[in-house]
Amino acid sequence: MSILSKYKANVWINEVNDIVRGACGGFLFGIPLLYTMEVWWIGSQVKPATVMLAIALTFLGVYLLNRTEGFRKRRRKSKPYEAVVDTIEAMGIGIVCTSIMLLLLREVTAQTSLSEALGKIIFESVPFTLGVALANQLLGDTRNPKEEGRKEKQPDQLHATLSDLGATLIGATIIGFNIAPTDEIPILAAAISEPRSLGIIAASLVITYGIVFEAGFADQQKRVEQKGIFQRPLSETITCYLISLMAATFMLWFFQRLTFSDPWTMWLDNVLLLGLPASIGGAAGRLAI
Amino acid sequence: MNNIGKEPRSLAEWITFGIASFILATIIGLVIYTWIENKHEPPILSVTNTQKIRENEGKFYVPFEITNSGGETAESVQIIAELEINGNVETGEQQFEFLSRNEKEEGAFVFNQDPRQGKLTIRVASYKLP
C-alpha cells in the first residue's frame, strides 16, 4: 500500500471514528429523554414556529460547546467557521440517530403526520445533539495512551472479569433505575412488534460495542489490552448485554412493573426495552473503571 | 503530530459535512413547509367504522378509525359509542391522548349485543386544545 492510499484510508477511518464517537456521546446523554413520554407529547403538539426556535437554540448551544470542545479528535479552533461546520455535523448525527430510535420505538410510524414526526425528532434530538458535542468530555479522551499507562501491571484474569461485570452492573443500574419505575416501558412494550424487538436487540449490541471498542473514548486502548475471560470484544459485548438484561429484569421486578403472574411475552418485551438504556449505561460503566 | 491541527479538512470530512448539511436543510425545509401549509384551522374530527364487525365468544367488536382533517392538534379526544336495541342502551367510550393534523388512529368498541340488530352511533364527544 502506498503512503498516499494509506493516508486516504486513515482519513476515512478517522472520520468514521469521529462520527461513531459523536453518536455514542449522543446515546449516553440522550437515551433517558428518548424514554420520556412528555417529550413525545411536546413533539405531538408543538407549533412549527417553536420547532424552528428549538433548532436555532440547539444550534447556538452546540456551537458554543464546539468552540471549546466537540466530538472530533482534531481540533482547529483557529478558524471560527470550523465550529459552525462541526455544529451542523453534530446536529446531523443527532437527527439521524434520534429518527432511527423513534422509528425503532414506534413513536414515529408511517401513520404519524409530518408535523408531529418533525416535532418529536427535533425535540428528542436536542439532548442527543448536546451529547454529540459533549462526546469528548463525557468519558474523557485518551486515544494515544502514554507508555507508562501501558506498562501498568495487569490484574489477573478472574479479577479483571469480575470488575468488568461489576462495572456493567453499576452502569446499567444507574441509567436503568431512572427509567424502570416509569410508565414509558409498558407503553412502548404495548406497541412493539417482533421485528422491532429484534431491532432493539441489534441496536443495543451495536451501540454498546461502538461505545466500548470503536468510539475512542477514554481507556479504550486499555480495554482492548485488558485480559479477562470474556475479553474478546464480541464476547464481552454479548456477555455484558446479558448482564444488563438481568439488571433490567431485576429492576422491573423490584419496582413492581413485572409480577410473576404476567405472561412471559410481557416480561420479554419490557426487559428488552429497558435493556437498551441499561446496556448503554453498562457500556459507559465499563469505560469508567 | 504538532501540525495536525493545521491540516486542511479532508475529503472524508467534507463529505460528512455535505451529508449533515443536507439532512439539516431537509429538516428545516420540512418544518417551514408545515409552517406555511398550516391552515390554522381548529381540529376537524371524524369517526368511521369501515371495517367489518367481528364476533368472538359472544362479544361484538366494532372497529373504528378516527382522523383529524383540521389544522391543529386535538388533545384528549373522546369518542362515545351508543348501541340501542329495543330500548336497551349499551355505551362505550374511548380517549386518544393526541391527534395531530392528518393523523389517523384506530380502535374498537366491544358490545354484548349484536350492533347489526340495533341502532349504533359512534361520535366524537369532546376534545381540548393543547
Image (cartoon, coloured by chain):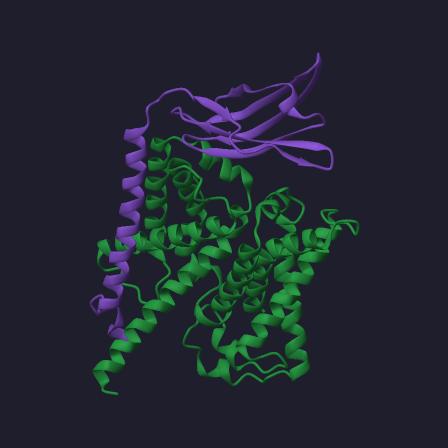
Q: Residue furthest top?
A: B87
- Please tell me in which quadrant of the rendered image residue A271 appears: bottom right
x then y, percent, for residue B3: 24, 73
Q: Work out whether residue A224 can be spotted.
A: yes
User: Does B64 sit above or below residue A118?
Assistant: above
Foreground residue among A173 and B6: A173
User: What colour denotes chain B?
Assistant: purple
Q: Along the horizontal axis of the image, is A15 left or right of B125?
A: left
User: Does B69 sit above or below residue A224?
Assistant: above
Q: Quadrant of the N terminus of chain A?
A: bottom left
Foreground residue among A164 and B81: B81
Q: Along the horizontal axis of the image, is A79 left or right of B87?
A: left
- Please tell me in which quadrant of the rendered image residue A133 appears: bottom left
Q: Along the horizontal axis of the image, is A287 left or right of A82?
A: right
Q: Quadrant of the C terminus of chain A?
A: bottom right
x then y, percent, for residue B43: 43, 22
Q: Residue furthest front?
A: B117
User: Does A174 sit above or below residue B124?
Assistant: below
Foreground residue among A281 and A112: A112
x then y, percent, for residue A172: 62, 60
Q: Residue at x 67, y 79 (%)?
A: A159
Q: Residue furthest bottom?
A: A1
User: What colour denotes chain A?
Assistant: green
Q: How many labels sit on residues?
A: 0
x then y, percent, for residue A249: 70, 57
Q: Residue at x 23, y 87 (%)?
A: A2
Q: Residue at x 32, y 33 (%)?
A: B34
Q: Work out whether residue A175 can be spotted.
A: no
